[in-house]
């Protein structure tokens, strides 16, 4: 079955300003983020990917466009799907990731890791909702796809807090304790998909690989 390559977007101005910025507009890629996207395109070139899906958030769309341009593909091959957008932090949208907002955000992720799937920041999404949403995005990308590999340009929060819970070959009791769990800008995570009796299952192949980016160019 096809492989899915999840690419976190390149560094954006919201990363530099350390803000929750999950609306579709604003906060473009920085020059460093553009260079990261170009490096990602070269790293993934050998995969012969021709199906590209992206979150509608500006920094992800820009990343997808840069990658496709480097591959000689037109923007028309890019499909924008809302199901792989960053998860909503509700009332914290636009705020700096600092102080009380950061504290409650960390508490939220701890609660999710402990199995409280319905906890949310006011007006934001729950763990149950983001996992369900990502499943729907994957199902959409695989419909009629055959055996061709797929690229999905998405976000660090969604991928780090949903994808591990969806992979059959991970032990979650130890996964988040290991080094290298955080997803840096333009790191690549890959999964192998399988379909049996109309049910899709995932096996993790590689997690958050940004070894192809110079250390001085890496960022969160």
Image (cartoon, helix red, strand yellow):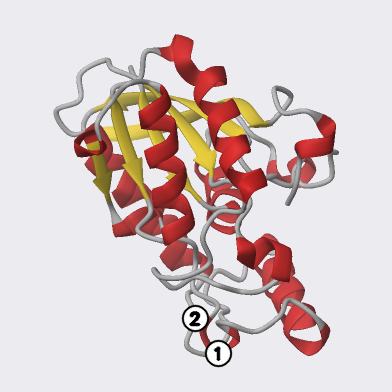
Residue at point 62% right, 36% down?
Answer: 36
Q: Nearer the viewer, residue 44 or 124?
A: 44
Q: Earlier in the sequence, mark 1 or mark 2?
A: 1
Residue at point 72% right, 28% down?
Answer: 213
Q: Position of residue 137 (x, y in %)?
A: 31, 48
Q: Position of residue 35 (x, y in %)?
A: 61, 36
* Distance between the alpha carbons at the discs numbered 1 and 2: 7 Å
Q: Is residue 69 left or right of residue 155?
A: left
Position of residue 18 relative to residue 79, above or below, is: below
Residue at point 28% right, 53% down?
Answer: 81
Q: Position of residue 180 (x, y in %)?
A: 80, 38
Position of residue 124 relative to residue 128, above or below, is: below
Position of residue 207 relative to residue 47, above or below, is: below
Q: Is residue 37 left or right of residue 209?
A: left
Q: Nearer the viewer, mark 1 or mark 2?
A: 1
Q: Position of residue 207 (x, y in %)?
A: 65, 32
Residue linked to disc 2: 124
Residue linked to disc 1: 91
Q: Is residue 126 left or right of residue 196?
A: right
Q: Pointer 1: residues within 10 angstroms few (<14), some, or many (20+)?
A: few
């Amino acid at each position: 079955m096809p492989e899915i390559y999840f690419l976190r977007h390149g560094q954006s101005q919201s990363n530099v300003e350390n803000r929750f910025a999950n609306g579709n507009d604003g906060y473009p890629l920085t020059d460093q983020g553009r260079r990261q996207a170009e490096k990602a395109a070269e790293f993934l070139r050998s995969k012969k990917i021709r199906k590209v899906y992206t979150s509608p958030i500006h920094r992800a769309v820009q990343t997808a466009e840069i990658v496709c341009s480097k591959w000689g593909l037109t923007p028309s091959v890019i499909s924008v799907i809302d199901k792989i957008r960053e998860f909503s932090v509700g009332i914290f949208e636009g705020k700096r990731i600092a102080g009380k907002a950061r504290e409650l955000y960390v508490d939220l992720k701890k609660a999710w890791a402990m199995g409280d799937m319905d906890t949310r920041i006011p007006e934001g999404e729950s763990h149950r909702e983001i996992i369900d949403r990502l499943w729907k995005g994957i199902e959409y990308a695989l419909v009629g796809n055959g055996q061709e590999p797929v690229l999905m340009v998405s976000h660090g929060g969604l991928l780090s807090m949903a994808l591990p819970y969806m992979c059959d070959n991970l032990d979650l009791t130890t996964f988040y304790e290991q080094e290298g769990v955080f997803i840096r800008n333009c790191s690549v995570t890959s999964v192998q998909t399988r379909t049996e009796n109309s049910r899709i299952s995932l096996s993790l192949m590689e997690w958050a690989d940004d070894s192809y980016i110079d250390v001085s160019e890496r960022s969160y």
